[in-house]
Structures are given as structure tokens and as C-alpha cells.
Amino acid sequence: MTLAATSSELEAFRARGYFVRERVFAAAELEVLRSAVERVHTRVVSESRAPHAAGVERIDGKRYQELAGACVKWEWDEARADVRSMEPFVHLDPALDALADDPRLWRPVTRLCGTERLALFTDKLNFKRPGGAPFPWHQDSPYFAFECPHVDRLVSVQVYLDDATAENGCLWMIPGSHRAGVLPGLTDRGVVGRLYTDVERALAEAPRVPLAAPAGSAIFFHGDVVHGSQVNRSSASRRAFVLTYQPAGHSQFRRPGVRDVGATRT
């Protein structure tokens, strides 16, 4: 497998704001990772029920909680005790911590970031259980910009841990939307709603593309490209993780210190 981004991938990244590499991880590797993320889920749910657990914070009616060194977002349905997403997560399991140093993930990013030396900016885990809620259209850069002056040099990689389809809530993209820069957010959806892109205002005629791909596939994408996901209408989970890279030497988003990766890590 070619590790560096190819010329055609670079062109796709410039034109569409993303490209996909299918089956980056083998079946045996995925089994290890799925087991690890389920251990993390079990731990987080257990810690949420402990007497000393931090309280649940509600923003726009949604539940958030600080647990195990992560910001945990619970499923929108109040009756469910499922984690919707959590950030960060790799610090909770050795198999997950090793992901940031996997050259299949960071090496293609070097040409996209314009540097050979990278550091981890942040890491996020999405569970998307059956019936799991959608994630509205959004850009990552407005969210990251609060803590990152070099937000224009961030590149994210999402890896599917399960086969992803339109039915089970795969990632959707609006190709080329990154070329417009930061777009207006919604003004009628509360506090967090401002971070959701007002696509009807800014991109009403733009095509929406579902990125269905087999388990183990990786999507490399720009911080300004508009993306989201729909409800998981299947009977199985659609789990995925996202690693966001930055030039080496910069601090992490929600963890202390610098986490250089790959060949630059000491």
C-alpha cells in the first residue's frame, strides 16, 4: 500500500475536500479495535453511575458529561444509556493509543498538512448504535478555531470500524464546500446550533454524497468541508473513530501537552 498521498488523492482533496482509502485495516485488526472501543464504552457507562461521577450538563436539551478524561455526549433519547460520541478517547486503551502512530493514517496527511512532522490535535469516537441520532451538517473548523490558531492546517481521518451504508448512518459529504471557507451557522438551534452549517442558506443547490464503504476504510478530509450523518436505521452499530492531525510541536485540544506522532515521537 502506498502510504503517502498520491497525486490523484491530492487533487481530490483540493477539489472535493476529501478522499477515501478502502480497507486500510484488515479484519483481524478491526476485531481488536472493536473489542477495545466496547471496553471503553463499558467503562464510561460504569463511571457515569459511580457516586463520584461528574454531573450531567445539558446544552440545547442534549446530555454531556465529563468522564474518564473525555467529554461524553449521550444519545439524544433520554431513555437510552448509550454513548453517542466522546472526545478524546485513545488514552483509555493501549490498542487505541497506538492508532495515532499508525503510518497508514498519519503518513498520507503529511502532504495535506504541508509538513513531514505531525502531532495529534484531537481524537473522537462515534458509536452510532441502532436508532442512533443523526449528526447535523457542520464544518469542523469553527469548532476547533476556539483553541487552534493554525486551524487551516488541521486534517482529519475517519475510520469505519463497521461496514458503513446509507442505511446505518454513514458519513455524508458536500463535495467542494471547503472552497467557500467558513460558512454561516444556524441561528435558531440554540448554543451548539451555531456550529451547524446553514446549508439551505449557503449550499442549497450543492450535491450531498453518502460515503458508503467497507469496514476498515479511511476518509481523509479538510476542516472546512461540510459533512454529517443520518439516523442508523439498521439493527447493528456503525462505529467509527476520527483522528485530527496538526503540524508537530503543537499542544493537543483536550489533553495536556504535545503528542507528536510516528517518526517524530520520542
Image (cartoon, grey):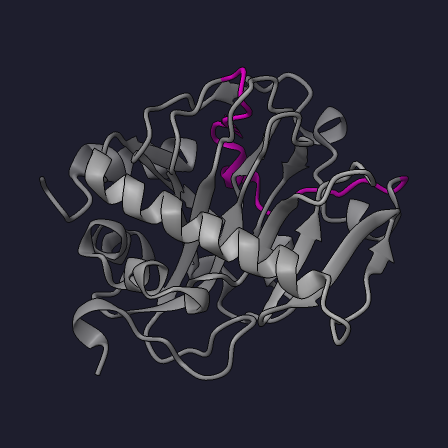
**Frontmost residue, 162 versus 263:** 162
Image coordinates of residue 10 in percent, x first then y, are: 26, 40
Q: How many marks?
A: 0
Q: Is residue 188 left or right of residue 240?
A: right
Residue 201 highlighted magenta (yes or no): no
Image coordinates of residue 257 in percent, x first then y, are: 45, 84
Question: In what quadrant of the picture does the N terminus appear?
Answer: top left
**Displayed quadrant of residue 148:** bottom right
Image coordinates of residue 23 in percent, x first then y, are: 23, 32
Give the main secondary structure, helix, strand or loop, of the magenta stretch: loop
Q: Which residues are magenta?
A: 166-188
Q: Is residue 61 left or right of residue 47?
A: right
Q: Is residue 97 above or below residue 184?
A: below
Q: Which residue is located at x 64 percent, y 16 percent?
A: 205
Q: Is residue 2 above or below residue 59?
A: above
Q: Is residue 22 above or below residue 120?
A: above
Q: Which residue is located at x 24 percent, y 70 percent?
A: 117
Residue 171 highlighted magenta (yes or no): yes
**Frontmost residue, 115 versus 234:** 234
Q: Which residue is located at x 65 percent, y 65 percent?
A: 47
Image coordinates of residue 146 in percent, x first then y, are: 65, 67
**Displayed quadrant of residue 202:** top right
Question: In what quadrant of the picture does the C terminus appear?
Answer: bottom left
**Frontmost residue, 235 versus 158:** 235
Q: Is residue 229 left or right of residue 239?
A: right
**Frontmost residue, 163 versus 228:** 163
